[in-house]
Image: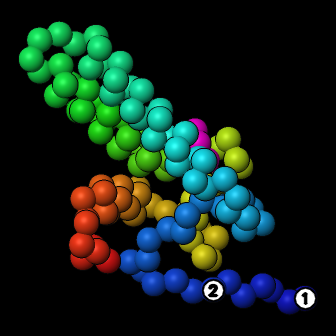
Amino acid sequence: MTTAVRPQRAANEFPLTGSTSDGDETGVIAAFLIDMTLHAAIGATAWSIASGPTAVLYGIVAWLGASFLHRTLIQRLTRTTVGKCSFGLELRHVDGTYPSTGQLVGQWFRGGLCCFDVFGSVD
């Protein structure tokens, strides 16, 4: 009886993009757009409900809060997001293990920094 050898990964490696159980990554961009639209819709709803000069601030906080909770805690509990689930995708490492909450939080902050990285300095 032979056992399959799984590739080893570095301890600080970020998870791969979402993939299906057979490694297919079809739908990753569409899944991202679905998730981004969901987060933006929550922020826009908070903005429209709030009144006064701080309404925009409430909308931004709601958008960031929804994004953070969805992409860290909910993804850790369900191993997917709404967008990824639509395409049968899950976020995992090369060796098949799922990312920890700390890795998901780190990846969320890294993604946020990349949004503002116009000179390519974030590795």
Tell me if mark 1 has few (under 14), some (14-19) or many (20+) residues whose alpha carbon lies within 10 angstroms of its own: few
Indicate the amino acid at tag 1. Met
In-image side of 68 versus 90 (left or right): left
Give the prevailing secondary structure in the magenta stretch. helix
Colour approach in the figure: rainbow
Q: Which residue is mark 1?
A: 1
Residue that protrudes farthest toward the left in the picture: 53
Q: Secondary structure at mark 2?
A: loop
- Residue sitting at 86 percent across and 89 percent down? 2
- Residue sitting at 32 percent across and 34 percent down? 63
Q: Secondary structure at mark 1?
A: loop
Residue that protrudes farthest toward the front in the picture: 118
Figure quadrant of the C terminus: bottom left
Q: Is residue 88 above or below residue 15?
A: above
Indicate the amino acid at tag 2. Pro
Tell me if mark 2 has few (under 14), some (14-19) or many (20+) residues whose alpha carbon lies within 10 angstroms of its own: few
Residue 7's tag is: 2
Residue 82 part of the magenta segment: yes
In-image side of 57 versus 97 (left or right): left
- Looking at the picture, tell me which residue is in the foreground, 91 or 114: 114
Which stretch is magenta?
80-84
Quarter of the image where one finds residue 50: top left
- Residue sitting at 35 percent across and 43 percent down? 68
Inter-mark Cα distance, 1 to 2:
19 Å
Given this view, does label 1 or label 2 mark the residue nearer the observer? 2
- Residue sitting at 31 percent across and 63 percent down? 114
Residue 121 part of the magenta segment: no
Lower position in the chain sequence, tag 1 or tag 2: 1
